[in-house]
Image (cartoon, rainbow, N blue to C red):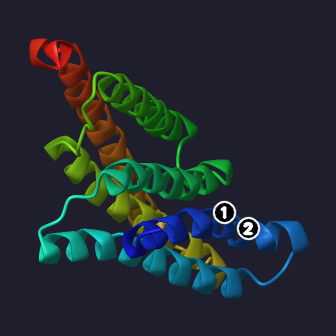
Amino acid sequence: MDTSDAVVASRIILAPLFFVAFFLPKWFGAAEQISAVLLWVLFIVIEGLDFVPTARARRRGLSVDSGKLLDPFADSLTKLTFFLSFAMTGIMPMWVFLILLYRDLAVGFVRFMVLRRGTILTARISGRFKVWIYRVAGAAGLVEVTRRAFFESWSDSAPLVAAILYTFYAAGLIAVWSLVDYLMVLFSRKARDV
């Protein structure tokens, strides 16, 4: 296994650890502060590892086909794990999570259909924007986790909660745009001719 693939695989392995760390306080009734800190560490490591294969490939002028397939899967798995955790606890509206889930499943299908035609579909510009908006929304969700763990007594948290909610709405909007963008590739004449 290539080093870049190993880095991507480590993100896949860390995703369920994030889920477990998220729900430890609910399962055992304690350690919310420890869980919040651990979640930030996992989030930073997962997101930081996302830059490693890309940076190495650019430095070497490489474009590895396995990375083109594995990296989008790791992105989907990690982000959906973050957002599922938030949705299950009421931090993120469930309907926003469903939009994100449906988008990722549909884009996975599009990638598969294009791959059957002999082409690996690389990230579209909408997909690159989506990654950054999802990253911000993930961090915003963790801000709310941190507030609940350390500062739940804040009486005036409504503006903060509203700002976090708007980041989730932005993630939902970019997911719809990205889905349309990828569907256009699937149904374009050029893609059909491949």
- Front residue of 161/26: it is 26
- Compared to 9, does 170 lie above or below? above
In the image, taking residue 18 as reference, residue 96 lies left or right, namely left
Q: Identify which residue is drawn at 52% across, 65% down.
A: 9
Q: Identify which residue is drawn at 39% across, 59% down.
A: 137
Q: Quadrant of residue 115?
A: top left
In the image, taking residue 37 as reference, residue 110 lies left or right, namely left
- Compared to 188, does 77 lie above or below? below
- Front residue of 122/27: it is 122
Residue 161 location (% of width, % of height) = 45, 61
Q: Which residue is mark 1?
A: 16
Q: Identify which residue is drawn at 36% across, 55% down.
A: 134
Residue 65 location (% of width, % of height) = 30, 51
- Compared to 83, does 99 lie above or below? above
Q: Amino acid at mark 1?
A: Pro
Mark 1 Cα-neighbour bin, 10 Å: few <14, some 14–19, many ≥20: some
The residues bearing labels 2 and 1 have C-alpha atoms spaced at a distance of 6 Å
In the image, taking residue 70 as reference, residue 92 lies left or right, namely right
Query: Does the residue at mark 2 contact the one at mark 1 (Cβ under 8 Å)?
Result: yes
Q: Identify which residue is drawn at 24% across, 25% down.
A: 180
- Front residue of 29/120: it is 120
Q: Which mark is residue 20?
A: 2
Q: Amino acid at mark 2?
A: Val
